[in-house]
Amino acid sequence: SNRAFAVGMPDKLGHRIMTSERCAALFRRIDTNASHTLEPGEVKVLLEGSGLPSGEDAVMEAMDLLDHDGDGTVDFSEFEEWYSKMAPPTPIQPLLLSTSNGG
């Protein structure tokens, strides 16, 4: 029924907004030189923070996956597209909560 659909909408919309804000916050955190793009070194940090392999091959593979226009960097729209597909329902906790690399 339409009523059930209408009741469901705010939750979906709210989730989408939350995911988008989370994505933007994560992008800003990884974009350490504030260039509004992610270079391979910054993608390496993303992989490390996500607990994924972060060797040279893994970074190159991630760049191939994320960098749709082939310019050698990942812009926010490219990152957001990946994030919306790959993001777990909860944020990538270790990366968002860590305040330094020193641990």
Image (cartoon, rainbow, N blue to C red):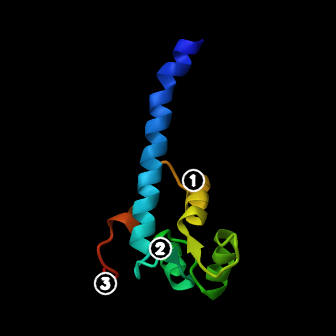
Disc 3 marks which residue? 102
Distance between mark 1 and mark 2 Cα atoms: 18 Å
Q: Callout 2: helix, strand or loop?
A: loop
Q: Amino acid at mark 3?
A: Gly
Tell whether 55 sits left or right of 18. Answer: right
Q: Which is in the foreground here, disc 1 or disc 2? A: 2
Q: Position of residue 69 (x, y in %)?
A: 70, 72
User: Dividing the picture into quarters, in which one does residue 56 lie?
Assistant: bottom right
Can you say which quadrant of the picture contains the C terminus? bottom left
- Residue 84, label in figure: 1
Q: Amino acid at mark 2?
A: His
Q: Position of residue 92 (x, y in %)?
A: 45, 60
Tell whether 101 sits left or right of 55. Answer: left
Q: Amino acid at mark 1?
A: Ser
Which residue is nearer to you in this view: 29 or 71? 71
Q: Which is in the foreground here, disc 1 or disc 3? A: 1
- For the point 57% across and 62% down, which residue is it? 77
- For the point 46% across and 72% down, which residue is it? 49
Q: Callout 3: helix, strand or loop?
A: loop
Other-residue count near label 2 (Cα within 10 Å), few / some / many at <14 / 14–19 / ≥20: some
Disc 2 marks which residue? 36
Q: Position of residue 51 (x, y in %)?
A: 50, 71
* Numbered-mark total: 3
- For the point 55% across and 20% down, which residue is it? 5
Q: Callout 1: helix, strand or loop?
A: helix
Q: Is residue 86 above or below residue 98?
A: above
Q: Is residue 72 above or below residue 90?
A: below
